[in-house]
Amino acid sequence: MSKRKKLREYWTFLSRAVRRPSTFGAVLPTSRHVAAAVATVVPSFGTPTVLELGPGTGALSSPIQRRLSEGARHLAVEIDPEMVRYLHRTKPWLEVIAGDVTDLRELLDAAGVDRVDAVISSIPWTLLPPDKQRELLEQAVSVLTPGGVFTTVTYLTTLWRPSTREFVSALEDTFDEVLPRTAIWRNVPPARIYACRRPK
Ligand SMILES: C[S@@+](CC[C@H](N)C(=O)[O-])C[C@H]1O[C@@H](n2cnc3c(N)ncnc32)[C@H](O)[C@@H]1O
């Protein structure tokens, strides 16, 4: 991506993030270092269906898309109308669904999708109250194939928050395997990825 496009992406993200801090939970899009690590959970063969929750400006979308083979399906549910417009303009190959993850089942039904092989989430989980975290996790799990993977990005700066511990507990209660990856410092703020498999 050219420097000019990058700056435009940052500006689009920042200008929305300052208006809706609790929906964004970050001031900049995820770095390419985190995005590259996240993308590795997506199957690079076959024709999987991949779902992003909260794609923002699509920082994770391009590395994920590069891994996918022909015939794979790549959808993304985004609540912010400005981000939806930005994605339509800049990533026409992405199936963007305007809506709230709370309504995930209905949104996917309308898109003709029954189950997905990978959920990649970067919604700000740790800003949500515990009951909302669990409600949205349930939604995500309900659309996952039994062999599917749920991946999420959390921030090291929020480790001290009780809501982060609540979220990790919710992950452990929901999945048989919860794998935290090593911290990635080249991100603002530094990030940790969780890859979770086998819903209980
Ligand atoms: C931290 S940003 C991540 C953006 C992008 N994936 C990245 O990694 O740079 C969180 C995104 O989640 C979206 N979001 C937050 N809550 C949501 C919800 N309930 N349903 C759909 N999108 C949501 C926000 O609008 C924002 O675009």
Image (cartoon, grey):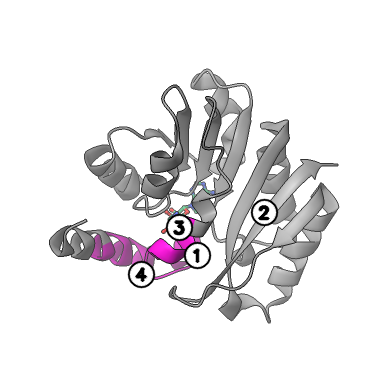
The three-letter code of the residue at mark 4 reads Val
The three-letter code of the residue at mark 3 reads Ala
Label 3, label 4: how far apart the Cα atoms are: 22 Å
Sequence order check, earlier mark of 4 and 2: 4
Q: Give the extent of the magenta segment.
A: 10-36
Identify the residue position indicated by label 3 in the image.
35
Residue 138 locus on image (x, y percent): 73, 42
Give the camera-side residue of 150 and 53: 150
The three-letter code of the residue at mark 2 reads Ala
Residue 147 locus on image (x, y percent): 73, 34
Identify the residue position indicated by label 2 in the image.
195
Q: Is residue 122 visible?
A: no
> Secondary structure beneath disc 1?
helix
Residue visible at 63% across and 66% down in the picture: 126
Figure quadrant of residue 105 = top right
The three-letter code of the residue at mark 1 reads Ser
Sequence order check, earlier mark of 1 and 3: 1
Sequence order check, earlier mark of 3 and 4: 4
Q: Please name which of the two marks, 4 or 2, marks the residue nearer to the observer.
A: 2
Mark linked to residue 18: 4
> Secondary structure beneath disc 2?
strand
Label 3, label 2: how far apart the Cα atoms are: 13 Å
Label 1, label 3: how far apart the Cα atoms are: 22 Å
Mark linked to residue 133: none
Asked whether mark 3 lies closer than 8 Å to ligand 1, one says yes
Give the camera-side residue of 70 and 53: 70
Considering only vertical position in the picture, is 3 above or below 50? below
Label 4, label 1: how far apart the Cα atoms are: 9 Å
Q: Is residue 45 left or right of residue 180?
A: left
Mark linked to residue 22: 1
